[in-house]
Amino acid sequence: MTLNIQLIDKCNLACKMCNFVDNMKHDEMSIDDFIRILEKNKDVLVHGKRINNIRIDGNGEPLLYKDIKIAISEAKKRFPECRITTNGTLLTESLSCDIIEAGLSNLVVSVTGITTNVYKHFQGHGKNGKQLESQFVDVVSNVERFAWLNKNKYNNTVNLQICYCLSEDSQQEAAKAAYFWKTKGVSSVIYTSVNSGLGKVKETFNKYINSTTYCKSNICFETISIMANGDVCVCCNDSIRASNKIMSNVHTTSLFEMVNSEMYRRFVDAIRAFDIDALPSCCQRCDLIRVLPS
């Protein structure tokens, strides 16, 4: 079970595939509030499971947070795993050492494309010419340096991965990305599809999900997200916080109370029954509530 905590609700990029770019509120969680949330929830059971992983990103850029080293350290004192996802632009040598020494378990760098021809459609969106080229080169260099430090100075204590978004704009470089990043010292590449359901109106989405045979996904039960202002959402893809009506704010209501509430139980029942109409608007048009049959 993963608790995804957003420390800072802002980003230094405007990735084209990001559902959060236009909805960021620039909130920032204090380090004291973060520690308080960790302490209160270290023994909470969600669906009968203990929280074993703290994700520090929440769809903002976590390396913008000035106390990121303290945050990682405090998370690891209470939970087995701590992961952050970053766009890699701010991954300097000193910051790399800081987050490794803090006890980070898993670093995921979101980079789509192994050339600027693809990268410009994703993390490089809005950049062009020398600015685009410089950003891409810097990210690759930052990742390569992190991998070197992790291996040669810290004995590979961090699992370093790349997240690659699959779409028509990126598929031509997808297969080569695994080899490209392996030569840079990355352990693996995570391939994820762009959520194509979110932008569809309800009527179109109903046709969309009926066009292929799908089965229900359990991913909705694996993560709960706490936003920088304390709002709790059932999913890290809820950019408009529609599911906050099901949950509440962690500063006024405990997570234990939320996951044991009648409203949350109705949400879980609707997911299990695949009752689209009973779900929040953010869930009704989301690919993640279903998966292709294995």
Image (spheres, grey):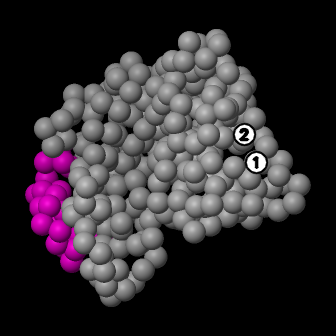
Residue 276 is covered by the magenta coloring: yes
From this view, report whether residue 101 is shown above or below residue 81.
Answer: above
Label 2 Cα crowd, 10 Å radius (few <14 / some 14-19 / many 20+): some
Label 1 Cα crowd, 10 Å radius (few <14 / some 14-19 / many 20+): many
Residue 221 is covered by the magenta coloring: no
- Return the mark for residue 103: none
**x 64%, y 55%: residue:** 173
Tags 2 and 1 in contact by the CB under 8 Å rule? yes
Question: x and y percent of residue 255 in the render?
Answer: 24, 43
Question: x and y percent of residue 293 in the render?
Answer: 25, 60
**x 34%, y 25%: residue:** 79
Is residue 148 among what the camera can see?
A: yes
Badge 1 marks a residue whose secondary structure is helix
Instruction: Locate the N terminus by quadrant.
Output: top left
In the displayed structure image, the side of residue 217 where residue 36 appears, left or right? right
* Residue found at the far bottom of this picture: 203
Of the residues shown, which amino acid type is indicated by label 1? Answer: Phe
Question: x and y percent of residue 287 in the render?
Answer: 36, 66
Relative to the observer, which residue lies in front, 70 or 211? 211
From this view, report whether residue 133 is shown above or below residue 240.
Answer: above
Relative to the observer, which residue lies in front, 160 or 96? 160
Which residue was labeled with disc 2?
Answer: 140
Relative to the observer, which residue lies in front, 140 or 26? 140
Which residue was labeled with disc 1?
Answer: 136
Is the magenta region chiefly helix, strand or loop?
Answer: helix
Instruction: Locate the C terminus by quadrant.
Output: bottom left
- The magenta region covers 256-282
Relative to the observer, which residue lies in front, 129 or 85? 129
